[in-house]
């Protein structure tokens, strides 16, 4: 078993309770129930960021409950919620901030979704409410990430907004453009962007094939741009699915520990603990 640092963080986990918190109508997938107790018995980290997923819609109640339960166990917890712009009033954002939420996430698969305008509206609302949240999007094409570079830089300069990329941009390491990826990763150097080292075997990828890109990410900004996420309980999000994927989380950690040991400079502790503690403070 790979030893993780004390007070380690896993910044991408989900909780599901379809009985107590029913899924939205016409949900794309229907994962089985998984509780906070299931989480802490399955993943080696101490502290967690609970990430809302598609079946929950924009109901934040389960995320707030999960954070409270984790704290009652002596652990730290934060939340990443999904909200419509209409929900993002100062009062609601401040309420969620007090509960431990530190970021908002949105799905970019909606038809006609204008990312530039939406990112700007989100950054403005967070700034007006006085909450220092990060902004995360489920963007499944790194070409889109590349097109948003000017927007990210501008909003970071105007509002101090920090952005987070899920699952190593969901990119195919065998088909990505190195120059475009280098442009995106310049945002890591600038402190504009963090990258979740998560979902390493999603999107038909092999974790081993991602390691050169992971090494590049973790070598930037003194190792302060990467965040570990197990993506537990590793749902199969294909249409109509009711199942979970069998993921070798320990194997992924072993691969990442090897990369971090090669880089040195406390990279393992930064990836697994201090980067998240700083971002989600």
Image (spheres, grey):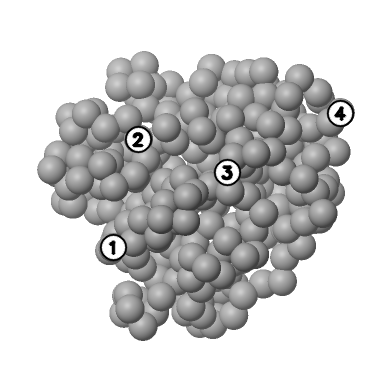
Which quadrant, please, contains the N terminus? bottom right
Sequence-wise, the earlier of marks 2 and 1 is 1
What kind of element bears circle 4? helix
Sequence-wise, the earlier of marks 2 and 4 is 2
Sequence-wise, the earlier of marks 3 and 4 is 3
Query: Depth check: 247 or 151 in front?
Result: 247
**Residue 183 visible to an observer of this rendering:** no
Percent coordinates x, y for residue 218 in the rendering: 70, 29
* Structural crowding at the residue carrying mark 4, measured as other residues with C-alpha within 10 Å and reported as few (<14), some (14–19) or many (≥20): few
In the picture, the disc for residue 9 is: 3
Percent coordinates x, y for residue 243 in the rendering: 59, 80
In the picture, the disc for residue 61 is: 1
Left or right position of 226 against 106: right
* Structural crowding at the residue carrying mark 2, measured as other residues with C-alpha within 10 Å and reported as few (<14), some (14–19) or many (≥20): many
Query: Depth check: 225 or 37 in front?
Result: 37
* Figure disc tally: 4
Disc 1 from disc 3: Cα separation: 22 Å
Sequence-wise, the earlier of marks 3 and 2 is 3
Disc 2 from disc 4: Cα separation: 32 Å
* Structural crowding at the residue carrying mark 1, measured as other residues with C-alpha within 10 Å and reported as few (<14), some (14–19) or many (≥20): few
Q: Mark 3 against mark 2, which lies toward the viewer?
A: 3
* Disc 4: which residue: 262
Disc 2 from disc 1: Cα separation: 18 Å
Q: Can you say whether 279 is above or below 17 in the image? A: above
Q: Residue at x 72, y 27 (%)?
A: 267
Tag 2 near tag 1, CB within 8 Å = no
In the picture, the disc for residue 133 is: 2
């Amino acid at each position: 078993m790979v030893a993780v640092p004390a007070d380690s963080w896993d910044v991408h986990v989900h909780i599901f309770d379809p009985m107590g918190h029913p899924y939205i109508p016409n949900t794309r997938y229907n994962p089985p129930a998984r509780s906070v107790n299931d989480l802490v018995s399955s993943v080696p980290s101490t502290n967690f960021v609970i990430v809302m997923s598609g079946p929950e819609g924009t109901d934040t109640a389960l995320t707030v409950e999960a954070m409270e339960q984790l704290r009652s166990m002596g652990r730290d917890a934060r939340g990443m919620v999904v909200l419509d712009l209409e929900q993002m009033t100062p009062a609601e954002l401040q309420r969620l901030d007090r509960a431990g939420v530190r970021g908002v996430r949105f799905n970019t698969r909606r038809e006609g979704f204008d990312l530039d305008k939406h990112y700007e509206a989100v950054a403005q609302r967070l700034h007006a409410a006085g909450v220092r949240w990060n902004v995360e999007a489920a963007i499944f094409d790194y070409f889109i990430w590349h097109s948003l570079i000017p927007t990210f830089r501008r909003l970071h300069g105007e509002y101090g907004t920090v952005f987070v990329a899920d699952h190593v941009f969901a990119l195919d390491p065998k088909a990505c453009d190195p120059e475009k990826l280098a442009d995106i990763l310049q945002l890591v150097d600038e402190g504009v962007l963090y990258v979740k080292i998560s979902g390493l075997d999603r999107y038909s990828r092999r974790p081993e094939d991602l390691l050169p890109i992971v090494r590049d990410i973790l070598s930037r900004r003194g190792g302060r741009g990467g965040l570990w996420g197990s993506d537990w309980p590793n749902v199969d999000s294909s249409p109509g699915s009711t199942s979970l994927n069998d993921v070798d989380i320990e194997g992924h950690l072993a691969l990442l520990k090897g990369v971090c040991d090669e880089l040195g400079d406390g990279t393992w502790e930064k990836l697994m603990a201090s980067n998240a503690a700083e971002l989600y403070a």
